[in-house]
Amino acid sequence: MGKRQRVDWPSLILGIVFVLAALMSFRLHPAQNVSILVSFFVVTVIFRGIYMLKIRSTVRELFRVSVTPLLVIGVIDILIGVYFLFNIRKGVMLAPYVFALWFLMDSLFGLFELGWLKQLSTRLFWVSLVTNVIGLIIGMLLLAKPIVSLMTLSFMVGFYLMIAGLAYIMRAFSSYLF
């Protein structure tokens, strides 16, 4: 009998949330709607943190690799999300820096995932590599010019979320993870 494929529902849901957040981000006028963007960020980052904590044991069992980066990024995502959930005004004021640091941390930890992703799928490995490099570039751009980046924040966040969302959707349909 052939191997039965299953859908990784948390990856699929996270991918859909990222794609929806990206589409909303593209529609926003950055100067007027930063608070909406920060609110989407809060929901997305909390959900992603929970997802990272959920897949830790599966990754450890299947690939026999260290899952410490997944634990660290999951906890950091949840803490950042909860903090800004109760401090939306601070999130709005610090939006370029918050997004820059999130992109940089997320992309750096994403590079640590490449080892086990390559075992899972070469295509997923390359998509993740490209996504993480783009995330690093966007994070550095946001840090380098925070005032200018505020005006392009909606587009840059949307661009990154779209690519990351599509990568999560691809991961959801991988036959090896769950």
Image (spheres, helix red, strand yellow):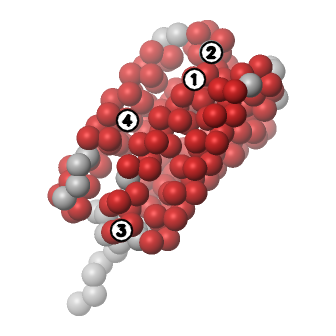
Tag 3–tag 4 contact (CB < 8 Å) = no
Mark 1 or mark 4: which comes first in sequence? 4
Local crowd at mark 4 within 10 Å, few (<14), some, or many (≥20)?
many
Q: Secondary structure at mark 1?
A: helix
The 10 Å Cα crowd at callout 2, few under 14, some 14 to 19, many 20 or more, is some
Q: Which mark is residue 120?
A: 3
Q: Is residue 166 visible?
A: no
69 shown above or below 146? below
How far, Cα to Cα, is label 1 from label 4? 15 Å
Q: Identity of the amino acid at label 2?
A: Leu
Residue assigned mark 2: 94
**Residue 73: image tag:** 4
Inspect the image, locate mark 1, and give the three-letter code of the amino acid beneath it: Val
Residue 66: x percent and y percent? Answer: 23, 49
- Say left or right for 38 vs 173: right
> Residue at 26% of width from left, 41% of height from top?
68
User: In the figure, residue 25 lies in which quadrant?
Assistant: top right
Where on the picture, by quarter, is residue 51? top left
Q: Earlier in the sequence, mark 2 or mark 4?
A: 4
State if disc 1 and disc 2 touch (CB < 8 Å).
Answer: yes
Q: Amino acid at mark 4?
A: Ile
Q: Residue at x 28, y 63 (%)?
A: 178
Could you say whether the residue bearing mark 4 is in a helix, strand or loop?
helix
Rendered residue at 37%/35% (across/down): 73
Q: Residue furthest bottom?
A: 1
In the displayed structure, does residue 157 sit left or right of residue 149? left
Q: Is residue 169 above or below residue 152?
A: below
Q: Disc 1 designates what residue?
A: 98
Q: Is label 1 in contact with label 4 (beta carbons under 8 Å)?
A: no
Question: Which secondary structure, mark 3?
Answer: helix
- As helix, strand or loop, the secondary structure at mark 2 comes to loop
